[in-house]
Each structure stands twice: as structure tokens, then as C-alpha cells.
Image (spheres, grey):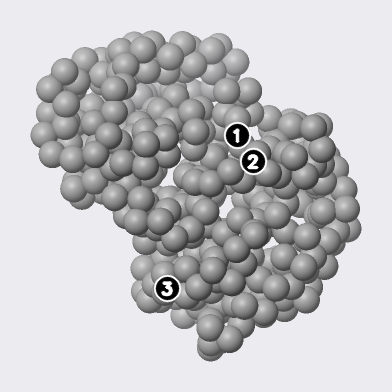
Amino acid sequence: MTQTAKKAEYFKAPVFAVAPMIDWTDRHCRFLHRQLSKSSLLYTEMVVADAIIHGPRDRLLSYSPQEHPLALQLGGSDPEKLAEAVRIAADFGYDEINLNVGCPSDRVQSGTFGACLMRDPAHVADLVSAMKRVASVPVTVKCRIGVDDQEPAQVLPDFLARVIGAGADGVWIHARKAWLQGLSPKENREIPPLDYDLVYAMKRENADVFIGINGGIADLEQAATHLAHMDGVMLGRAAYHNTGMLAGVDDLLKFGAVEKARAPDVDWLALNDTMMDYAAELIGRGGRLHHVTRHMVGLFQGFAGARRFRQILSTDATRPGAGPEVIAAAFAAVDIAGGPRVRPEEQKLAG
């Protein structure tokens, strides 16, 4: 299949994605998410190009085959290093390479990448061009609508024109500015106002290019609203803290109906067995149960017994020598047959 054909199939709208989240969307998290949704596009945590070039590549880039479709998010500001990281990652078979131009953290800024790159769209275009020259899969960008005192309506159209002109196959836009000084990463996700209308306008102006939206999207109803305007919708912490929400994604994408997605037909007992087997295999390789179960805490928002489920995973799973039987005990505490007492989207997010 040619790269053009791959791109056309890969970006067939609508797309639901789980955002890349540092320290959260590791391979164990993604394995769990894939059990709940076969259609969702999953992203790795951001991996810095230097780490791939000089660090433990297998540990950084390996994943379970079941995780596809899977995108690798890269951080960096040097075109040659990013191109080399893309070459190395090619052997691991990712479905997409994404460039982080949206993270506002001090740690990322100290490496002169992430959201601070939005101040230099010509340089971002050079980075995209370098990555495209060596990539055999789509290359995308994840950005903000602007940074600091920039006027998003003025700077975002030029930014998109440059990165798309450089060959970007798609752009995910977080519909908030990033303030590089004075706000923490958490505050940057909450305080700058959302401007969905601007992102919608960018999609209308780039009708032939995949444009997805991110930021402040809390549930499947909101996701469906955005998909009426955009090619894709990306949820981050809402999907992580209310993991069971992902069980409705496939029906949402297939039928376009939130009503069908609210009460998905999930084989929870099969999920229990799958996660126990996965945990046992990890423990056999020297891992710990908590590496898996810390991502499962948000599975049963709204179900009777959910609090006890969380307690078991948060305490028993962290004890030395804890094994897969802890997962069975946690599942046994939930009234699975009774279903959620209210829609999971109406529950206050855990954590």
C-alpha cells in the first residue's frame, strides 16, 4: 500500500483518540484501553528524540501488538534528531508519528520544544519537513491555538498553513492558548478559555486536511457534538479517569448515536480474565501488579461497588508480592450485572 493510500485509510473520519499523557498513557494503560475500544486511536506518552537516539530504545518504543492503531508522539526541536528518531521508530511499526507542539511544562520548555515552538511556525515547518522525508507513515502535529500574548485568530491560520505546506498529514488542535510563564501545566488545561469556534473555522478553511479537536471534552455526548464539525475528537484525562467511557466509543463511531454508546455491551468478566493474564505475564517478567492496576481505577464510575473496586486496586495491588488475584477481588466487588446507576459521564471524575 502506498503512503497516500495509508493516509486515506488511516484518517477516515470520524476518529476518536485518547491523548498522549506523560506518566499515564504507557503501554499498560494502552493495552487496557484497547480492550475497551477497538477503534480508538491511541497515543504514546511523549518521547524525546534524544532519548530514542541515545537511550534504551526497546524500553521506550516497545508495545503490545494489540495496541494498534497506535501513534508515537515525539518531542524535539532539532530536525536532524527528529528525523533520526523517526528512522529508528520505523522498525517498531507505529501507525503515525506525531510532533508535540502543545506541551507548556517547564521541563519541555527547557528543551526548547513543546508549546514554545508555536512562536516559530517556520521552524515547526522545517521539523515536519525533516520528519516527512524519512517517514513511511503519516506525520501529524499536536498544537495549541497560540501562546502567551499571541492573538489566536491571527497566528493559528498561518501556523497551520506552514505545517500543512510542509507536509503534515493532520493536525490535532487543543482549543486553548498555552501560557508559558505563570501557569502550571494543570492550570494551562483549565484557565485559558476554550475557543472551539476558532478550531471549527480552521477545519472549514482546511477541508482537505485531517483536523482534530482536543481540550475540555468531558464525555461522549460532547465528543459527538464536536464530531459534527471536526474530523476527529481527542479526550485526555476524562478518558483516563473514567476509563469505562471508552467502551462506548466503537458504537459512537459506528452508529453516530450517543444513545447506543451510553450502554455498551461489555463482557466485563472477559476483561477481568484478560487483565489478570496480562498482569501475570508482566509479573513473570519482573514487573509489578501496580504497573497495570493503577490504570484500571476509573473503570467502573457509576457502578455499585465502584468505591470498593478503587480501594482494592489502590491498596492491595501496591503491596509487595501482589498478584493477579487482586484484580479478581476488585472485579468481584462491583455489581456488574446492575450496570451504572447513572450514566458514567455524569459522575465526577476520580482523581
Counting the numbered discs, the total is: 3
Q: Mark 3, residues whose alpha carbon is within 10 Å: few (<14), some, or many (≥20)?
A: few
Q: Earlier in the sequence, mark 2 or mark 1?
A: 2
Contact flag, marks 3 and 2 (Cβ < 8 Å): no
Cα separation, mark 1 vs mark 3, equals: 29 Å
At 56% from the left and 79% from the top, the residue drawn is: 147
What secondary structure is found at the residue carrying circle 1? loop
Q: Nearer the viewer, mark 2 or mark 1?
A: 2
Q: Name the residue type under label 3.
A: Asp
Q: Is residue 128 left or right of residue 144?
A: right
Between 351 and 144, the one lying in front of the other is 144
Q: Quadrant of residue 282?
A: top right
Q: Which residue is mark 2?
A: 10
What secondary structure is found at the residue carrying circle 3? helix
Q: Which residue is mark 3?
A: 197
At 61% from the left and 45% from the top, the residue drawn is: 11
Contact flag, marks 2 and 1 (Cβ < 8 Å): yes
What secondary structure is found at the residue carrying circle 2? helix
Q: Which residue is mark 1?
A: 69
Q: Mark 1, residues whose alpha carbon is within 10 Å: few (<14), some, or many (≥20)?
A: some
Between 99 and 263, the one lying in front of the other is 263
Q: Earlier in the sequence, mark 3 or mark 2?
A: 2
Q: Name the residue type under label 1.
A: Pro
At 77% from the left and 68% from the top, the residue drawn is: 165
Does the image show residue 246?
A: no
Q: Quadrant of residue 342?
A: top left
